[in-house]
Image: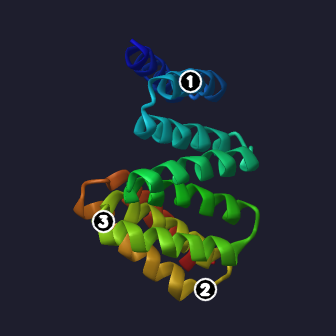
Amino acid sequence: MTKVKAKEHEKRGNSLLGESDLEGAKKEYQKALEQHEKAGDRQSEANTLVSLGNISFFMGDLEEAWNLNKRSMGIFEELGDQGGVSAALGIMASVKKEKGELDKAEDMYKRCLDIADREGLHDLTSAHLSNLGVVHALRREKDKARDCWERAIAIYEKFGAKDMARQVNAWLKRMENE
């Protein structure tokens, strides 16, 4: 029964996210997390922590985003879920990027990329390349940014994520015109 309740909360949380109601979504995911913890479902617990970490990141609570993803990463490592590790670490890298800690962000994104490449996780590879490109662009390292973004665009296009390919291509064009 707790798993059913957790899934109901997740479904409501997803719906609220779609409506850009971050506070409402956060409350639903917190309820789902409680149910996953009660059920001892570590995988779902870790996945929900990542969702909560994303919401916290978008709400500007970088410390909470860091802590939630660090917690999820520990569970993913315990479970041997390398994709989960890469996803959580990617959000943690984004926290470092937002704080202006670009060297740490770069190192973390590279670690994420290594995992995603090794595991064949194309969606994560393209996301991490996109974010690593932003780090390079912030440093005015245009060649490195271009390389990351062109690689990300190729992956997005190959796997049908045309909206993401257009977004990253717009970043590339903006940088080229600076």
Q: Nearer the viewer, residue 25 or 39?
A: 39
Counting residues from the N terminus, which is met first, the one under dot 1 or under dot 2?
A: 1
Q: Secondary structure at mark 1?
A: helix
C-alpha span from label 1 to label 2: 44 Å
Locate the N terminus and report the quarter of the image it occupies. top left
The amino acid type, in three-letter code, at marker 3 is: Glu
How crowded is the residue under tag 3: few (<14 C-alpha within 10 Å), some, or many (20+)?
some
* Res 58 visible: yes
C-alpha span from label 3 to label 2: 28 Å
Q: Is residue 129 above or below residue 13?
A: below
Query: To which residue does mark 1 refer?
Result: 34
Which quadrant of the figure has residue 4? Answer: top left
Locate the C terminus and report the quarter of the image it occupies. bottom right
Report the side of 68 relative to 155 (left or right): right
Q: Nearer the viewer, mark 1 or mark 3?
A: 1
Q: Nearer the viewer, mark 3 or mark 2?
A: 3
The amino acid type, in three-letter code, at marker 1 is: Glu
Report the side of 55 relative to 36 (left or right): right
Q: Nearer the viewer, residue 37 or 59?
A: 37
Counting residues from the N terminus, which is met first, the one under dot 3 or under dot 2?
A: 3
Tag shown at residue 119: 3
Q: Secondary structure at mark 2?
A: loop
Q: Residue at x 67, y 52 (%)?
A: 66
Q: Residue at x 48, y 27 (%)?
A: 36
Query: To which residue does mark 2 refer?
Result: 141
Kindly give the residue lying farthest to the top in the view shown: 1
Relative image position of residue 171 (x, y in whole percent): 53, 66
Relative image position of residue 89 (x, y in whole percent): 54, 60
The amino acid type, in three-letter code, at marker 2 is: Glu
